[in-house]
Amino acid sequence: MIQGVFKTLGATVGAAALGFAVTLGAASAEPTKVGFVYVGPIGDHGWTYRHDKGRLAIEEAFGDKVETSFVESVPEGADAERVIRKLASSGHDLIFTTSFGYMNPTVKVAKQFPNVKFEHATGYKRTKNVGTYAARFYEGRTIAGILAGRMTKSNVIGYIGSFPIPEVVRGINAFTLALRKVNPEAEVKVVWVNSWYDPGKEGDAAKALIDQGADVILQHTDSPAPLQVAQERGVFAVGQASDMTHFGPKAHLTSIVDIWDGYYIAKTKAVMEGTWSSEDTWGGLNAGMLSMATYNEAIPAEVVAEAEAARVAIEDGSLHPFQGPIMDQDGKEVVAADAVVEDGVLLSMDWYVQGVQGKLPK
């Protein structure tokens, strides 16, 4: 089921992403229509921004052989179903739905349009014409945890969460495990904003966490507001989904950057050639589906070296972010020494590791 790395797409992705010529079968009289549904605005400078960069990469790769469109700021729920159905009924051959809450609407509409191919980001429900994809964002959280553990002076880290789903909980836990390996005294305080993109709520959450002593801010939300608050308040922060350096150059330690370009090009090519099939792809650093932005010059060289060593080790498989021993929030060992948490457990993670304060909302 879960493909551990992006290599399943083979050299096709790498070649397409590098701009090599794409050889297609019989030319079609009409361009292939590719649609995108976004949960935030394309100017969020985070999650949606990076997905839209992937859409533009499709246009650059295929020119007039494709026609792309997008609908931005679509709420999860009934509005999403309406937008997805409109795209499917207006001649789109391939539709990317790019938020977890679009899962059920995507599957529902796909049943009504069996000839349209759908790709859903971060979900787990697949059908004959619905594939799923995500990146192993938690790998980047591990690197961020090392940086935060070395750079904090208060030993209080603030983490702004969107929704308490496994993807977000997994990131909090990966971050905390890495944080406490280099700094066992550090703890993580989480504020949930129940939104993917709400600059006001995100900014207020950052202020509240800083008021509680946090001197490093993490986020699994999409706007640069937390980083801007960190810059104003003189603390550090880690950006989300895209390089957010210019929103707070003094505060910005690094960002976890999502890279969808190659995947989108490869899946579009598959539809054009008639070779598309429903798959689940879960790629990480070694697959090129995410990377780390430039490190802040304020970070000591030895700390950068430590973070980079972890990145290389994750890429070559010698380091797994969820390798035991791991204690849960109550101090009970839940993963034995040297054991590695399997993907199935990661995908359903609904508990905190030791070092995270507060209770996980249900």
Image (cartoon, grey):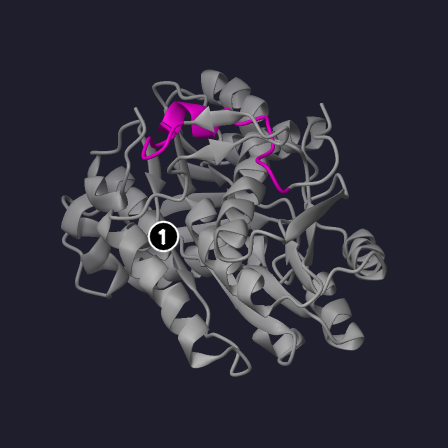
Residue at (57, 62) in percent of width and height: 148
Q: Which residues are magenta?
A: 336-355
Crowdedness near tag 1: few (<14), some (14–19) or many (≥20) residues, C-alpha within 10 Å? many
Give the vertical position of 25 relative to 253 (above or below). Answer: above
Give the vertical position of 63 relative to 271 (above or below). Answer: below
Q: Position of residue 110 (x, y in %)?
A: 47, 22
Q: Nearer the viewer, residue 36 or 39?
A: 39
Question: Is 353 contained in the magenta span?
Answer: yes
Q: Nearer the viewer, residue 300 or 33?
A: 300
Q: Position of residue 228 (x, y in %)?
A: 73, 70
Q: In which quadrant is the N terminus drawn?
A: top left
Name the residue type under label 1.
Met
Residue at (45, 36) in percent of width and height: 91
Magenta portion: prevailing SS class: loop
Q: Badge 1 is on which residue?
A: 289
Q: Nearer the viewer, residue 59 or 219?
A: 219
Residue at (68, 42) in percent of width and height: 162
Q: Say which quarter of the image contains residue 362.
A: top right
Q: Is residue 158 left or right of residue 323?
A: right
Residue 29 visible, this orientation: no
